[in-house]
Image (cartoon, rainbow, N blue to C red):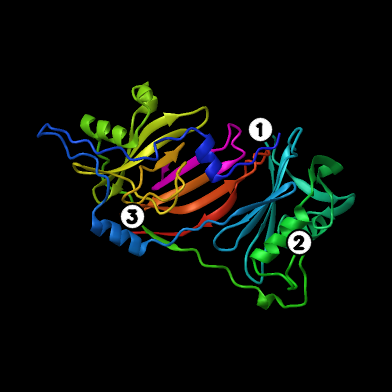
């Protein structure tokens, strides 16, 4: 069965981590208790953050027949094979990545599904026509992709002329034409399908990625006390029946630098997605974490007056917060994100997506930024 997923559908059908409606702030009467969870950051912090943050607009994905395609904000485009609407998925997926700009270098990648052995192609055949693949880049990749544009079936050939996988080329030509359009190649000599006589110099250059001035994590993470945790759970409207479910639902804390601590508060659990509400702890003050882009199952960025944002299957590693919202258990559709801390909010540095649940777990990049640590 064919399954198509989008960010909105993820939010509507998957088990969301937190409510979208903010709860009233709780006031703790005990004089020794810390300040309650704030519903908004200070005006100074919000103003500074909005002044430095770049508007985030990831690229969109398209599906043409048995191929998904998308481009990121630098005009780097990726074409990915999909399994059939019905039946078993091919044991190998194929991806074509084309760089932006006049040179527009291409690269092909083959990935085995599951625990399959590495793919070592020596050639592909397109409708029976053999195209040698001594390498997967440059003119070798160009020849294979050009052949694909007018074919119906592609077979991956390994040593000894052994067929490794058979892929449908339905929609490949339309997807390649779409890349020509997105990269400004239509009617130029560099186009894959929409060819013309215009020189390569007519193709626009790579769009520069925005620069994020990220804080280098330092210091020691603080641990929220019981009153703070209770206030955070009420603010995020976490599932009360799950709160004390052993180590699985204990909060995680990470030092961000400058006295700030990121708190990931497990909030809800589904079959393959755990959602955690995100807070920033500074001394006695706890605030919902701000983001410059939708995170987890959110549909809008988390601003000062928005609901608590969440991270799905979150992981903090090397100063980066990673989120992986799966569309289903196979992980062959969903949204993967990476955020970094700029001192006031979490900034989206990478995003990749797969909108079709059709056997390809290799997501298409739709956003990237340059990170400069300070």
Tally of marks: 3
As rendered, which of 32 and 132 lies closer to the eye?
Answer: 32
Q: Do the residues labelled 3 and 1 touch (CB within 8 Å)?
A: no
* Snapshot quadrant of residue 292: bottom left
Residue position for label 3 = 215
Residue numbers of the magenta segment: 315-335
Residue in view at x 34 percent, y 61 percent: 50
Q: Can residue 373 be seen in this view?
A: yes
Task: Tell whether 265 sits left or right of 101.
Answer: left
Dot 3: within a 10 Å radius of its alpha carbon, few (fewer than 14), some, or many (20 or more) residues?
A: some
Q: Is mark 3 on a helix, strand or loop?
A: loop
Identify the residue at the far right of this view.
Answer: 128
Q: Does the magenta stretch include residue 318?
A: yes
* Image quarter hosting the N terminus: top right
Q: Mark 2 points at which residue?
A: 142
Q: Identify the mark at residue 100; answer none if there is no mark.
A: none
The answer to whether residue 109 is above or below residue 229 is below
Q: Position of residue 249 (x, y in %)?
A: 37, 27
Which residue does the image show at 71% across and 43% down from the upper left?
82
Q: Name the residue under label 1.
A: 115
């Amino acid at each position: 069965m064919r399954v198509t997923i989008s960010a909105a559908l993820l939010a509507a059908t998957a088990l969301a981590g937190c409510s979208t409606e903010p709860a009233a702030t709780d006031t703790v009467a005990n004089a020794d208790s810390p300040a309650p969870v704030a519903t908004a950051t200070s005006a100074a912090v919000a103003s500074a953050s909005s002044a430095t943050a770049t508007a985030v607009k990831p690229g969109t994905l398209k599906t043409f027949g048995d191929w998904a395609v998308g481009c990121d904000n630098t005009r780097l485009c990726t074409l990915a094979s999909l399994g059939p609407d019905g039946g078993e998925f091919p044991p190998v997926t194929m991806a074509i990545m084309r760089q932006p700009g006049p040179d527009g270098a291409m690269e092909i990648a083959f990935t085995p599904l599951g625990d399959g052995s590495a793919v070592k192609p020596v050639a592909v055949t397109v409708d029976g026509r053999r195209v040698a693949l001594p390498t997967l880049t440059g003119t070798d990749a160009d020849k294979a992709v050009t052949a694909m544009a007018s074919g119906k079936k592609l077979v991956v050939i390994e040593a000894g002329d052994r067929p490794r996988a058979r892929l449908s080329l339905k929609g490949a030509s339309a997807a390649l034409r779409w890349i020509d359009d997105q990269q400004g190649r239509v009617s130029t000599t560099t186009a894959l399908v929409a060819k013309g006589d215009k020189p390569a110099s007519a193709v626009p250059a790579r769009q520069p990625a925005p620069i994020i001035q990220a804080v280098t994590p330092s210091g020691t993470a603080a641990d929220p006390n019981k009153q703070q945790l209770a206030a955070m759970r009420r603010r995020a409207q976490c599932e009360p029946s799950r709160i004390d479910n052993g180590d699985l639902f204990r909060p995680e804390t990470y030092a961000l630098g400058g006295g700030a601590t990121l708190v990931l508060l497990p909030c809800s659990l589904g079959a393959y997605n755990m959602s955690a509400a995100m807070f920033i702890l500074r001394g006695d003050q706890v605030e919902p974490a701000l983001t410059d882009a939708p995170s987890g199952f959110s549909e809008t960025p988390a601003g000062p007056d928005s609901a608590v944002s969440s991270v799905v299957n979150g992981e903090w590693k090397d100063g980066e917060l990673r989120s992986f919202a799966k569309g289903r258990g196979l992980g062959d559709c969903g949204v993967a994100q990476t955020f970094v801390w700029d001192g006031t909010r979490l900034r989206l540095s990478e995003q990749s997506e797969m909108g079709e649940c059709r056997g390809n777990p290799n997501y298409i990049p739709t956003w990237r930024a340059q990170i400069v640590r300070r």
